[in-house]
Amino acid sequence: MSVAAQRTGAQSQVTRRSEPKKGARKIVHLTSVHPAFDVRIFHKECKSIARAGYDVTLIAAHDRDETVDGVRMKAMAPPSGRISRMLRTTWAICRQAIREDADLYHFHDPELIPVALVMRIRGKRVVYDVHEDVPADILSKQYIPRRFRRPIAWLAGLVEMKSSRYFSAVVAATNPISRRFRFRTASTVVVSNYPVLDQERDDRQESWSRRSGSSVVYAGLLSEDRCIREIVEAMRLLPPSLGATLNLAGSFSPPTYAREVTASQGWQKVNSLGVVGRADLSLLLNGARAGLCIYRPDPNCVEAAPNKLFEYMQAGIPVIASDFPGFHAIVNGVGCGLLVNPLDSRSIARAIEYVLTHPEEAEQMGRRGREAVNRTFNWASEEDKLLALYAGLLDSTSAA
């Protein structure tokens, strides 16, 4: 993500403080993989605990040290590649973590497990935030030769499980992830990727009748497991009379995947926007007729609950998602969209066409999704769980 996009993504004024609030407990979040203004890490967790009165530092790849919304950013130089990140960046983060001398360390990447163990040896409280099922994710990594994926996944899972016994707590992004840890660590809490309620954003949303055009949107990583090729092919299959367009917001991973996707005739109906900031994404969703949340049936995806699903719902647009059990429970349970076969471009095309040709029903889907977010699927309850976890760990007399 570019620095400009990160700054836009912060959606906040930069504030500065020379000294933390007197007596505040110090918490450090660490990430070597995610951008500094990651939605879960910065916008939800770090900003929430800063508002609660903690002294919060985020160690992440960034261009400079600064304080944003009460969160002190300690900048790490962006790594030159995956190996550099896993070795040089991890060592740099470890040194900075030791300098911070915090009461609690909250880390977000499995490659930082050695750093977490160092902090535990030093008597610190450590929380492991598990964003995804790591062994299952490794099984779908295209850059790992297929014959090596299963043994690497097994080894990664073993390291994760053995190490988690020494952590103070595990925070899991979904219930399926949490089940892997519940009997291996003292405290496991599910903190879901629900969106932060934003009344101003709700007030800015266009009414359905005033939305112009026939655009659908996908926001996120443009990769094979997100079925971008199938989505673009679905655009080719739509009747020309619909005038449908696809707005793609994100970057290709790996970059070579772009050649495969852009070769499709459906690419003529695509607006490729690159990585966009939070404010621009809000405007993009505000003009869309549907949001696409389509994943391949890989082990790490079938029970996923990604940010984009709930952000589409919050924006009041129908969701078109893979027909997986996790998505089925939310999308069909709420009645906020349609489910498709992610490997069948015709199935995707039929869902897009249905939403665009049934505007009244699409509007009702969007309204039900937004109501469900306002009522249930929002950050307020998740924030309470995170703060309760911190309070329990920090109020104890010794490192948990």
Image (cartoon, rainbow, N blue to C red):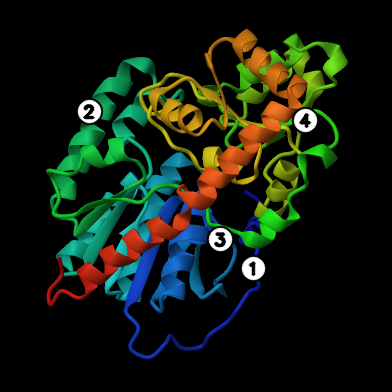
- Identify residue type, mark 1: Ser
Do the CB atoms of the residues marked 2 and 1 lie less than 8 Å apart? no
Question: What's the CA distance linking mark 2 and mark 1?
Answer: 42 Å
Q: Residues within 10 Å of mark 4 (few under 14, many from 20)?
A: many
Question: What's the CA distance linking mark 4 and mark 3?
Answer: 33 Å
Quadrant for residue 347, please give it.
top right
Q: Circle 4 is placed at which residue position?
A: 215
- Secondary-structure class at tag 2: helix
Query: In the rendered structure, which disc, 4 or 3, sits on the residue that comes first in sequence?
Result: 3
Question: What's the CA distance linking mark 1 and mark 3?
Answer: 16 Å
Whether residue 8 is visible here, answered yes or no, is no
- Identify residue type, mark 3: His
Q: Circle 3 is placed at which residue position?
A: 62
Question: What's the CA distance linking mark 1 and mark 4?
Answer: 29 Å
- Secondary-structure class at tag 1: loop
Query: 158 or 39, which is in the foreground?
Result: 39
Relative image position of residue 32 (x, y in whole percent): 43, 52
Q: Circle 1 is placed at which residue position?
A: 12
- Secondary-structure class at tag 4: strand
- Identify residue type, mark 2: Trp
- Identify residue type, mark 4: Ser
Question: What's the CA distance linking mark 2 and mark 3?
Answer: 32 Å
Viewer-nearest of labels 4 and 3?
4
Q: Which residue is drawn at 76% across and 20% down?
A: 357
Which mark, by number, is residue 154? 2
